[in-house]
Amino acid sequence: MDIKKIAERLKFHAVDTTALLTASNPIFSALEVTACGMSDELSIHARLLATGTAYAGIGTLFRMGRDFSRRIFEINDQTKERTQGIHDTLYAMGFNLLISPPMYILAGARSLKEIAAGTALGVGFGLAGGWPMGYAIDVFSDLTGLQKSERKSYPEIIRKQKSKIKKGLAVSLTLGSIALMSGIYALTPDKQEPINKEIPAIHEVVKNARENRSYSLEKII
């Protein structure tokens, strides 16, 4: 295979995967620690695993499946946004239904309740986030200069910007997504709170040490 073609595919893989994670990770993390009642630790493990598997190939698999499905149903950038949104929603729901159970098991979920909750979350997110993920793929492809997007909902003012500005916007969106996730975990501390439970014990050790020291001094005097 031509090296240039390999390099081109790797670029599409990196951009598509980053687009998917930018759109999905903050919403997933928020729902995991609230609606599903997961600990921050389990949610972080799930997000790290999702990120790793996405860059390992799941992101490209999502894009390839989406492109294939769009061809079957004769959908393109000029198709009505509502139709594109419905397609991306149904596709994301089916895709997440397949990959969610093994992902949460690998992330550390052991109870059927946690696995079922995570899978239901994945399907539910497909319902709510299918359109944003599909839209993110098309927008990031345009922002990074890999493939122009002719979607009518894509702002013309952004479409006409210079390449450097577009790429800077793509980076800003990615960093903003990471910052949003950090904020979500900061506002929802881990339910286990192991550090707080250890603090009283530390205070007792210090108190006993001081008392023993005072007793020893009195005995010497």
Image (tube, grey):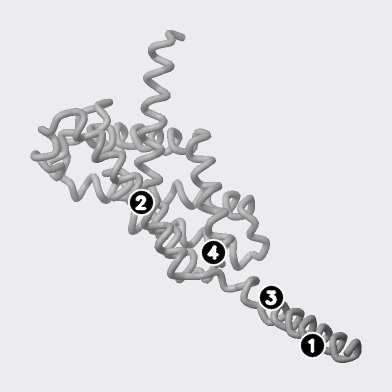
Q: Counting residues from the N terminus, which is met first, the one under dot 3 or under dot 1?
A: 3
For this view, does 219 lie left or right of residue 85? right
Secondary-structure class at tag 1: helix
**Disc 2 to disc 1, how far (Cα)?**
51 Å
| Three-letter amino acid code of the residue under disc 3 | Glu
What's the residue type where badge 4 is placed? Asp
Please tell me which of labels 1 and 4 falls first in the chain: 4
Q: Which residue is mark 4?
A: 40
Element at label 4: helix
Please report the residue visible at 62 percent of the width from the left and 76 percent of the height from the top. Answer: 196
Residue identified by numbered label 1:
211
Q: Residues within 10 Å of mark 2 (few under 14, many from 20)?
A: some
- Secondary structure beneath dot 3 equals helix
Q: What's the distance in space between the residues labelled 4 and 3, CA to CA?
A: 19 Å
Q: Is residue 85 toward the left or the right of residue 22 in the image?
A: left
Measure how far apart labels 1 and 4 are at the Cα level: 39 Å
Count neighbours of disc 4 (C-alpha within 10 A) and say few if under 14, some if 14 to 19, many if 20 or more: many
Disc 3 to disc 1: CB gap under 8 Å: no
Q: Which mark is residue 177?
A: 2
Answer few, some or many: residues within 10 Å of disc 1's Cα (few below 14, many 20 plus, some between 14 and 19).
few
- Quadrant of residue 110 in the image? bottom right
Q: Amino acid at mark 1?
A: Glu
Which quadrant of the rendered structure holds the C terminus? bottom right
